[in-house]
Image (spheres, helix red, strand yellow):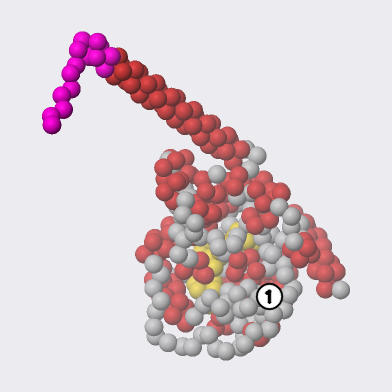
Amino acid sequence: MELYHIYDDKTDIHIKHLNTEINMKDNKNIRNTVTEAVKVIAFVLTFLILLEGLSLSVFSGRSAAKFNANLRDAYSFVEEPDDTIQIAGVGNSNLYSGFVPFSMWDECGYTSTICASPKQSISQSQNLLKKVYKTQKPKLIIIETDMFYDHLVQNDNQSSKRKISLNAVITRAKPDRFEDTIPQIFSIFSFHNRWKKQRAESVKNSFLHTHGYRYNNTVCEIDTADYMTETADIEPISDRNLNEINKLIDLCTKEGSQVMLITVPSASAWNYERHNAVENYAKQKKINYIDMNLLYADAGINLKNAFRDNGRHLNYDSADKLTRYISEYIRQNYDLQCLKDNPEYAKWNEEATSFNKKRNAVLV
């Protein structure tokens, strides 16, 4: 049986009318979608501009000491009078746990500041040093080498931060990188922790101005198994990190600073293979290198009770000994002036006295 579709003029008109209505609805939906998209884009752009404005004003580097515990010490140099710092150090938590500027002052009368933060990358260290050079002219830059093996290489040059697109932000926003990427673009996220409740322990072990050092007198005994077994093997530094290290050293040289590499003892993070790689690099660059993982005994450090945790970060007693050892090395190998008796630096004597009083009070 055949089926026939019969169309008359009225049917044709009706179909055309339906098509017109459908087209109008489609156009309306498209317009609504475009309108909503424009609203979303406008909101996002406004939000980003607001974040950038806050990052450049309220949450600038100078405000770090007030707004974020993690970065406060790394930016302690912003409170230093211009052209008063002789030595600046960059690195990660190994450095701010292992180097005590007041111990160097007491030992040699050298002024120093530590620009270090947790998991700080080489490029972040570059960025910090650029800020240091705006107000200071350090004769010597100490670079702690644990960050040479940091797998997160970030490009936080000012131009890159300004030109980065929203698409790039989204692309980079992977779980293991989001926390590192976003704060580099908008410093407001770097400083938001000021409103988080601080732990009692961190309050107990923190002082107002320690020139970047983070005091901690905890003693955590560890197994003294030899983690520095001598070998000819090398653990290569990645090409990306080598490129960043070269940039960092070039920056120091351009600004007229000498460079010294040090490795703070870290039983859980260092080995002889890494030592060999850094030593070869230092020889290639003709710069001094001290690996305290091999010289800790010369500094009077007992590894069994040297750390505040499971072999990663030095406690105060060991950091004090390490700093005094390095201070003597610097005195013998670099031409720096002792400023202890200079009345213009009397504040350092006052701060050192205050630091030791507070430190002793914590020990009681």
Which of 257/364 is in front? 364
Q: Is residue 13 left or right of residue 337?
A: left
Indicate the position of residue 100 as horizontal and vertical percent values.
Answer: 68, 68
In this view, which residue lies farthest toward the front? 1
The 10 Å Cα crowd at callout 1, few under 14, some 14 to 19, many 20 or more, is many
Question: At 54% from the left edge and 73% from the top edge, which residue is drawn?
Answer: 263
Q: Amino acid at mark 1?
A: Arg
Quarter residue 351 falls in: bottom right
Q: Is residue 327 visible?
A: no
Q: How many marks?
A: 1
Q: Eyeballing the image, is 323 above or below 162?
A: below
Q: Eyeballing the image, is 30 above or below 111?
A: above
Indicate the position of residue 319 as horizontal and vertical percent values.
Answer: 67, 74
Query: What element does badge 1 sit on?
Result: loop
Which of 338/238 is in front? 238
Question: At 55% from the left edge and 60% from the top edge, which residue is drawn?
Answer: 120
Which of 95/289 is in front? 95
The quadrant in which the C terminus is found is bottom right
Which residue is labeled 1 in the image?
A: 308
Indicate the position of residue 304 as horizontal and vertical percent values.
Answer: 66, 86
Q: Which residues are magenta?
A: 1-16
The quadrant in which the N terminus is found is top left
Quarter residue 15 falls in: top left
Which of 145/342 is in front? 145
Question: At 51% from the left edge and 34% from the top edge, which residue is drawn?
Answer: 44
Decide whether residue 3 is among the magenta residues.
Answer: yes
Q: Is residue 357 visible?
A: yes
